Amino acid sequence: MKIASWNVNGYRAAYAKGLLRWTLEQGPDVLCLQEIKARPDQLSADQLGFPGYHAFWNPAEKAGYSGVASFYKSEPDEVIYGLGEPRFDVEGRVIRSLHPGFNLYNIYFPNGQRGHDRVSYKLDFYETLLRLCDQMHAGSENIIITGDFNTAHEEIDLANPKENSTTSGFLPEERVWIDYFLQHGFVDAYRWLYPDRIQYTWWTYRFGARKRNIGWRIDYFLVSQALIDRVCDVVIHTDVEGSDHCPVVLEIQ
């Protein structure tokens, strides 16, 4: 089974830059998109989905902002929107789908902003999600969380860690929440497979960062410990453009 995740930084822009072609070439069983910045009623009939996929949309109430969408070859047993907390759910950040043997979260985690204006909101979001995951793990449910976490976990996960030590996305109080998830039954599937590999999933549009590979790894697959032996690979498609992020694909038995 292949699960693809991609922050497209605008669904309509990514669609115009080859999102459909890439999806059909890769043929993931599930495609999780973040930061779609569009509502279905703003899209043309052609843009509303991909041939052979069931589409589910969770746009933000605010136009042109945030939002996630998930596409499935096989329709899930159930689809749930949001975390059940209005201050998060109005921003269209979460789609949870139920599949045989696991729950899949497609999430666009909040950005703490340059001035750290939303760091507290971001940390509250992490806490709310982890509390829900703890309840599912306590009930012997397995979970895969994917999406744009907006946090680089360790120094290996960004090109300039020292220069970014006071930048949201690499603040100690943000990074520790990745630790908390790992301490609560999750595994970072990519780092489990490739403990020393340096690859990034996001590059600022400024300063020619992508060409120089001055990037951050902030797009993850966190997998319940009970599922980790079923993980075959995690592929970061650094060559795929169309966004300031690149796609990441989990292959799992």
Image (tube, grey):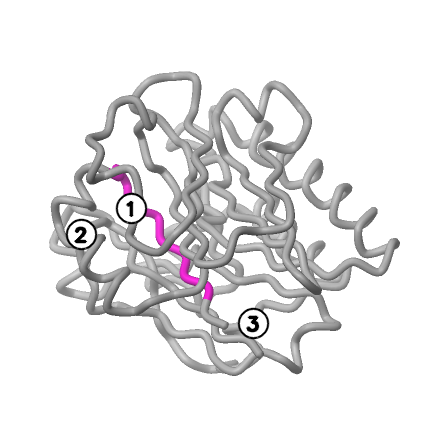
Residue 245 disc label: none
Picture residue at 70% right of the left edge, 36% below the top: 128
In magenta, the rendered stretch is 3-11
Percent x, y for residue 136? Answer: 80, 51
Picture residue at 41% right of the left edge, 67% below the top: 249
Disc 2 marks a residue whose amino acid type is Gly
Image quadrant in which you'd find residue 197: bottom left
Q: Nearer the viewer, residue 161 or 141?
A: 141
Picture residue at 57% right of the left edge, 26% below the top: 88
Residue 189 disc label: 3
Asked whether the beta carbons under mark 1 and mark 2 sit within 8 Å of each other, the answer is yes
Asked whether the beta carbons under mark 1 and mark 3 sit within 8 Å of each other, the answer is no
Percent x, y for residue 164? Answer: 39, 50
Disc 1 marks a residue whose amino acid type is Val
Residue 5 part of the magenta segment: yes
Residue 177 part of the magenta segment: no
Residue behind mark 2: 242
**Label 2 to label 3: alpha-carbon separation:** 25 Å
Of helix, strand and loop, which one carries label 3?
helix
Horizontally, residue 209 falls left or right of residue 184, namely left
Label tally: 3
Image quadrant in which you'd find residue 179: bottom right
Horizontally, residue 123 falls left or right of residue 137, namely left
For disc 1, the neighbor class at 10 Å (few under 14, some 14 to 19, many from 20) is many
Residue behind mark 1: 8
- Mark 1 or mark 2: whose residue is earlier in sequence: 1
